[in-house]
Image (tube, rainbow, N blue to C red):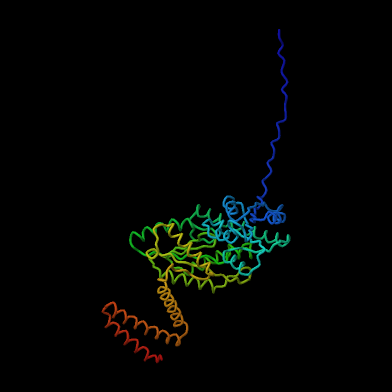
């Protein structure tokens, strides 16, 4: 008879699973563009070890590399190169519709020392300059600063994009989000076109925003955006819609309001922001904005894309012209509207004086009323409104008031 023996089961210790090491931070990438291999190698030696370096031999090649690699945070370019030089590259980058690319820091490293060349690069949007040859300590420190700026800018852009896709309220400023604005403007545009009504928007963007963030760092960006949001809330009408767009761009939409109403609001906002004191860590920092108007019925607008494209073009023009100004249109036809806008602003000033300055204000108010009567007389004569009796009555009452109060 076979005896069944119990087999001994080997108790093997199960293998310990390998512990995955957390991935470290991604090394920032810097693009060097120069037609000289020697120059590229010299810059690479300074940066390599701290940054991931990629190279291109001219502006056209650099543009292709940049468009295909969104990890690049800083562009370092020569001025004079074949195919596409540094100036042409800067211009192309600053005009691209992709925001992360348009706002990337650009450093020009060149042997060109003429003042005109530097002014040209500054006007095109270069961030910084260095003369060849570069010196390691200073150059490396500057590149670190610009890489930090590039990373901060990218985070802000990504946060804005996420916000546009997620909710109707901007968590930073508590204003409406870009997503809300796009949905609302599509509805308002369709309604205005269907009912032949006015619709206007005032777009504004903080001047030198990237440079301000680079200089002050930390919580500066959020503090500034919230401060600007408060200025908009205090100035806009209750029925206006305020939204935060990309990074430092905002928009105020005026339903059933035309070009003139929007121009008056825009000019009031510009003056308020310029004169108000923005304080950060007990330091007063001057803030200005570039503004533009987009008005349905006046501007060639059929779609929301038309609306946004026109705003982008006019804002870019305002910033190129030096900032702290408002572009209200593309043609000389706006000159008359601008004159009327300034007239209305002057009237506002006189009314404030009349309220605050006692007898002096009353004299100004009497002069203003006299001008108003003259305007009514002209309107009656030209438009045949049949207001002659009413105008005579107003003039008589005004004359009596002036005489009774002895207003000279």
Give the x, y percent position of residue 123: 57, 66
Give the x, y percent position of residue 165: 50, 52
Give the x, y percent position of residue 368: 40, 83
Q: Extreme top residue here?
A: 1
Residue situated in front as seen by the camera: 157 or 394? 157
64 left or right of 346 in image: right
Residue situated in front as seen by the camera: 26 or 397? 26
Residue situated in front as seen by the camera: 313 or 234? 313
Q: Extreme front residue here?
A: 82
Q: How many marks?
A: 0
Residue situated in front as seen by the camera: 364 or 78? 78
Query: Which quadrant of the figure contains the N terminus?
Result: top right
227 left or right of 6 in image: left
Query: Which quadrant of the figure contains the C terminus?
Result: bottom left
278 left or right of 167 in image: right
Q: Residue at x 36, y 81 (%)?
A: 372
Give the x, y percent position of residue 166: 50, 52
**Corner quadrant of residue 34:** bottom right
């Amino acid at each position: 008879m076979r005896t069944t023996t119990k087999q001994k089961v080997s108790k093997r210790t199960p293998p310990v699973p390998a512990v995955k090491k957390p991935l470290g931070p991604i090394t920032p990438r810097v693009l060097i563009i120069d037609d000289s291999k020697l120059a590229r190698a010299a810059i690479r030696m300074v940066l390599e070890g701290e940054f991931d370096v990629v190279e291109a031999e001219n502006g056209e090649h650099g543009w292709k590399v940049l468009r295909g690699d969104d990890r690049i945070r800083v562009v370092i370019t020569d001025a004079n190169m074949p195919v596409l030089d540094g100036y042409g590259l800067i211009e192309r980058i600053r005009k691209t519709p992709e925001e992360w690319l348009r706002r990337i820091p650009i450093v020009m490293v060149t042997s060109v020392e003429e003042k005109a060349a530097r002014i040209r690069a500054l006007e095109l949007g270069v961030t910084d300059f260095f003369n060849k040859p570069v010196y390691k300590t200073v150059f490396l420190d500057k590149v670190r600063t610009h890489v930090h700026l590039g990373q901060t800018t990218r985070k802000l852009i990504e946060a804005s994009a996420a916000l546009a896709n997620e909710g109707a309220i901007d968590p930073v400023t508590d204003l409406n989000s870009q997503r809300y604005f796009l949905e609302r403007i599509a509805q308002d545009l369709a309604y205005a076109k269907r009912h032949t009504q006015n619709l206007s928007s005032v777009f504004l963007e903080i001047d030198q925003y990237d440079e301000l963030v680079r200089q002050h760092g930390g919580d500066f960006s959020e503090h500034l955006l919230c401060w600007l949001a408060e200025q908009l809330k205090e100035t806009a009408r209750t029925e206006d819609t305020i939204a935060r767009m990309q990074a430092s761009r905002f928009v105020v939409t005026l339903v059933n309001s035309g070009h003139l109403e929007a121009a008056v609001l825009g000019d009031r906002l510009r003056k308020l922001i310029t004169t108000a004191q923005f304080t950060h860590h007990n330091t007063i920092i001057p803030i200005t904005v570039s503004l533009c108007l987009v008005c349905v019925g006046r501007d060639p607008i059929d779609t929301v894309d038309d609306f946004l494209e026109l705003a982008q073009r006019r804002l870019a023009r305002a910033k190129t012209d030096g900032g702290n100004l408002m572009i209200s249109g593309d043609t000389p036809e706006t000159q008359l509207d601008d004159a009327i806008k300034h007239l209305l602003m002057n009237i506002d000033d006189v009314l404030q004086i009349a309220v605050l300055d006692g007898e002096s204000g009353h004299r100004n108010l009497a002069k203003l009323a006299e001008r108003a009567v003259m305007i009514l007389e002209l309107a009656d004569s030209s438009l045949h409104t049949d207001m002659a009796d009413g105008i005579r009555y107003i003039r008589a009452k005004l004359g009596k008031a002036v005489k009774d109060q002895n207003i000279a």
